[in-house]
Image: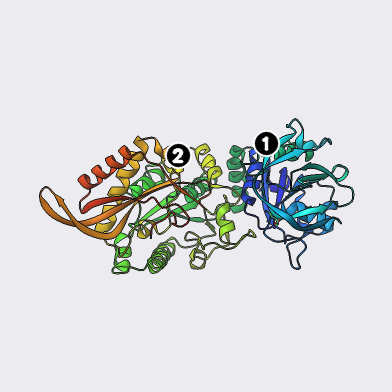
Amino acid sequence: MSAEQMEKVIVIDFGGQYNQLVARRVRECQVYCEIYSYRTPLEKIREMNPKGIILTGGPNSVYLEGAATAPKELFELGIPVLGLCYGAQLMMHVLGGTVERAPEREYGKTSVTIDPVSCPLYEGLPSSMICWMSHNDYISRLAPGFEVTAHTDNCPVASAQCREKDLYAIQYHPEVLHTEYGKQILSHFVLDVCGCSGSWRMDDFADRQIEAIRRKVGDGKILCALSGGVDSSVAAVLLSKAVGKNLTCVFVDHGLLRKDEGDLVERVFGPEGPYDLNFIRVNAQDRFYARLAGETDPEQKRKIIGEEFIRVFEDVAHQIGKVDFLVQGTIYPDVVESGLGGESAVIKSHHNVGGLPDLVEFREIIEPLRDLFKDEVRKVGLHLGIPEELVMRQPFPGPGLGIRIIGDITAEKVKIVQDADAIFREEMKQAGLDQTASQYFAALTNVRSVGVMGDERTYDYAIALRSVNTVDFMTADVTEIPYSVLKRVMTRIVNEVDHVNRVFYDITSKPPGTIEYE
Ligand code: GLN
């Protein structure tokens, strides 16, 4: 990739909660941006030749032993640096100021007053605004050469600057939407202070990647495990545009997909579809159902599905023969969650990543979407002309409906949950709620109870509907679905889906619930 010549800003990760947002806001200014751990050697940062550096927030206290730190030289590269929260405190600490436990910690929306000194970050902004604070420590004494540019009632240094060296420290979080004008402040930094041109576009991303992939793989043979999800689909199309028939996509239908999903994937990627690639669909439903028979433990079910997936894939890989590269649809949140690149704690291991590399002999893994966020991946997908139906679909777990069926899995139960889910999705769309709900689906509870239908006694299952609104999937509110819509869904499900005689709507938020249902 021509990344070396590309104008970029580097975000240095100190383990803060909002780091992904920082990178994203920079990209919204049309400036390319990458995140690196604070452990990245200074030499490497120098080589990347960034136009600017942003230090993120973080959970530690800069004055404690062993806290994440940065060398003094980072501030002497002649590259503008913006420190946010922990990053701001660290800048002061390293350059000779003082950071201490604050007499009053600040958390949440806070009014900040901009001091009457000329600061390029506040150009054209009002002298008072709301910002988002989240800190226990505070900057009690500035490092030499710095001046205060803003304060709050409790915080004498809400921001500070050393104009001469282009160093800026901000105690609050301009990257979160609660901070009024946060976007303008970051944009002033990357465009005005760092002098970035702001000419980077998401569309360029696809074209650049295609070019870079061609250069990298030459005539090599490439293998992609296609799940039909957004990420692997976009990765596959990028690859197919770059190398055509040198790409083979393997799509394992484990029988735990949403209704008609396997056929949709085949329509798009199969021989009738618009792309010139080798497509192999493996209908492995029976294999999966047989392995899962009688298993009720959710962790065990996940494990079986993951293992069987690898086994099926292995069989196909042997038929294909020699492979040079393996494609993975890893996106930035996966990188952080798996603890591969980020400083935040490991949250989960990834189904689509798990195991495959060991099975196939290959030279290298290609991850063309590694630096992107989900909605950015979607933009690339739309730019590449992938059907909206595929690109805009909601997140779907790797083990599929396997974890939306409580208790043991049978073909009959899969059919029930598929049909109920399809009805629910249809009605949500009909009501326009699909535009705002982040994730919604039907799950099959293992509860059976007595009901009456057509004067006959029934003893059938209860379906649970789940729908949440969330921005980051870390916390979630329940969607306030109008009662009339819920009623229609209920009526349709009990009428159209055999073996269902009750419908529940789950009103639990996250926390304490999770979004998925297992
Ligand atoms: N841990 C530091 C504090 O409490 C920084 C917090 C942050 O970066 N959000 O002040």
Badge number at residue 181: 1
Mark 1 beta carbon near ligand 1 (under 8 Å): no
Pick out the residue farthest to the top: 124
| Residue of label 2 | 436
The image quadrant of residue 488 is: top left
Image coordinates for residue 292, horizontal then vertical, percent: 32, 67
Mark 2: few/some/many CA within 10 Å (<14, 14-19, 20+)? few
Badge number at residue 373: none
Q: Is residue 486 left or right of residue 160?
A: left
- Please tell me which of labels 2 and 1 falls first in the chain: 1
Give the amino acid type for the residue marked by disc 2 in the picture: Thr
Q: Is residue 483 left or right of residue 162?
A: left
Q: Locate the C terminus and report the quarter of the image it occupies.
A: bottom left
Going 25% across and 46% down the picture, which residue do you hit? 493
Image coordinates for residue 395, horizontal then vertical, percent: 45, 49
Badge nearest the viewer, 2 or 1: 1
Mark 1: few/some/many CA within 10 Å (<14, 14-19, 20+)? some
Q: Secondary structure at mark 1?
A: loop
Q: Is residue 474 above or below residue 354?
A: above
Going 77% across and 56% down the picture, which residue do you hit? 90
Image coordinates for residue 89, horizontal then vertical, percent: 77, 54
Q: Is residue 212 left or right of residue 327?
A: right
